[in-house]
């Protein structure tokens, strides 16, 4: 079961296009890899390899 992780300061920034980009800090708090190829994935997942 996925847990709810509240978003706090430093968990994301807005890209020039206006999208929310989650930081490594957020991914580590969440505690798992979603395998979506996130820009700041601390778990080593890379979409190009999979």
Image (cartoon, rainbow, N blue to C red):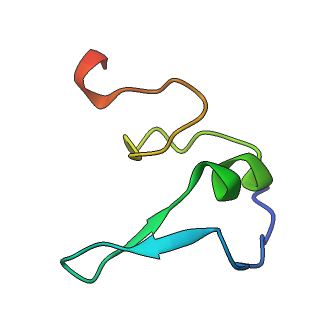
Task: Identify which residue is drawn at 61% across, 48% down.
Answer: 24
Task: Identify which residue is drawn at 55% across, 57% down.
Answer: 23
How far from the left and from the top, in percent, is residue 15?
Answer: 30, 72
- Residue 8 as seen in the image, left or right of residue 19: right
Quarter assignment of residue 29: bottom right
- Residue 24 as seen in the image, left or right of residue 1: left
How far from the left and from the top, in percent, is residue 43?
Answer: 60, 29
How far from the left and from the top, in percent, is residue 11?
Answer: 63, 68
Q: Is 8 situated above or below 30?
A: below
Task: Identify which residue is drawn at 37% across, 40% down.
Answer: 37
Task: Identify which residue is drawn at 53% across, 45% down.
Answer: 34
How far from the left and from the top, in percent, is residue 10?
Answer: 65, 70
- Residue 15 as seen in the image, left or right of residue 39: left
Q: Is 15 situated above or below 40?
A: below
Quarter assignment of residue 36: top left
- Residue 24 as seen in the image, left or right of residue 40: right
> Which of the image's four quarters has the N terminus?
bottom right
> Which of the image's four quarters has the C terminus?
top left
Q: Nearer the viewer, residue 28 or 36?
A: 28
Residue at the extreme top: 49
């Amino acid at each position: 079961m996925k847990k709810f992780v509240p978003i706090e300061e430093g968990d994301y920034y807005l890209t020039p296009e206006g999208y929310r980009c989650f930081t490594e800090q957020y991914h580590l708090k969440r505690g798992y890899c979603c395998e979506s190829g996130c820009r700041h994935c601390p778990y080593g997942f890379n979409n190009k390899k999979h």
